[in-house]
Amino acid sequence: MDNRLQNIVEHFDEIKIGVDEPFQFHCTQCGKCCVNREDILLNPKDLYNLAKELNLSPEEVINRYGESYIGDSSRIPIVRLKPQGSIKRCPLLKDRRCSVHKSKPTVCAMFPVGRCLKIDGADCSSDKIQECQVEYILNDPGCGDGKETHTVRKWFEAFGIPLEDDFFKRWHQTVLEIGTVIRKAEKIYGESLLNKIWTLIYVLLYLSYNTAEDFLPQYISNAEKAVWIIGMMPLQ
Ligand code: SF4
Ligand code: SF4
């Protein structure tokens, strides 16, 4: 577990916030949160939204602005915005403003709010994840002037992020299911075969979308295919 996650776990009760609980925050658009960043991850929905906004394919978005790698703990392909230059500037920051404000990645849109799935006392194995409760946390932004009062509900509404976010849970389920199999496969298969499997997962989960059509049905179909293919791999 990285330090940031460890910190959240240790202080969870102090930083958690209810959906209708007020918090003070006002972004002064200084752009500081868009530099010195190496952790702006794009889930498939973020990538689809950016592709649609920029009139590019998901693959073109990654080629221009991102990069992919295998997650240390998830063991599945991860996509992130590729930091630029010595100040590690987000490639979508133009003239100190986010150039994709309406379609910015979920982690950027939610800031300073974060969300997670509550696993205490609940079975959050992959087939039960839909029943897990979503919890919200308020990170100390350390920026802005605090001149506005918000709630998580209103904050999410403003960025079109649903509280009942079907994709959020489905994505966690997919990551868990595929990661579990990959961890077993890594003990048996060689690098060449593993790379082929990762490429297949990457193409299905991140690239195979038509932005003229709705995202979620395409994601569900792609994720089902990926999980089915992974499930066919002999692991003994
Ligand atoms: S969120 Fe904070 S750091 Fe980022 S632009 Fe707004 S005020 Fe600046
Ligand atoms: S996507 Fe926009 S808000 Fe997010 S780090 Fe890049 S420039 Fe900043």
Image: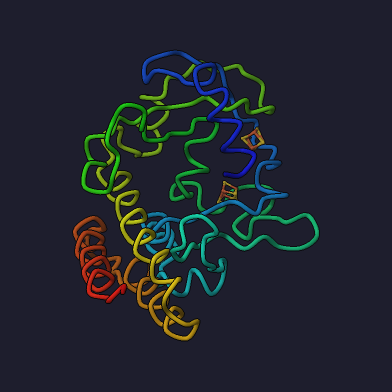
Q: Which residue is drawn at 36% across and 74% down?
A: 203
Q: From the viewer's perspective, is 100 left or right of 222?
A: right
Q: Which of 145 and 131 is in front in this view?
A: 131
The image quadrant where one finds the N terminus is top right
Q: From the viewer's perspective, is 218 left or right of 108?
A: left
- Residue 223 coordinates in the image, percent (x, y): 26, 63
- Residue 173 coordinates in the image, percent (x, y): 30, 50
- Residue 81 coordinates in the image, percent (x, y): 57, 60
Q: For residue 166, which quarter of the picture?
A: top left
Q: Residue at x 76, y 63 (%)?
A: 85
Q: Which residue is drawn at 47% across and 74% down?
A: 60
- Residue 225 coordinates in the image, percent (x, y): 22, 70
Q: For residue 135, which quarter of the picture?
A: top left
The image quadrant where one finds the C terminus is bottom left
Q: For residue 125, which quarter of the picture?
A: top left
Which quadrant of the picture is home to ligand 1?
top right
Q: Which of 171 and 184 is in front in this view?
A: 184
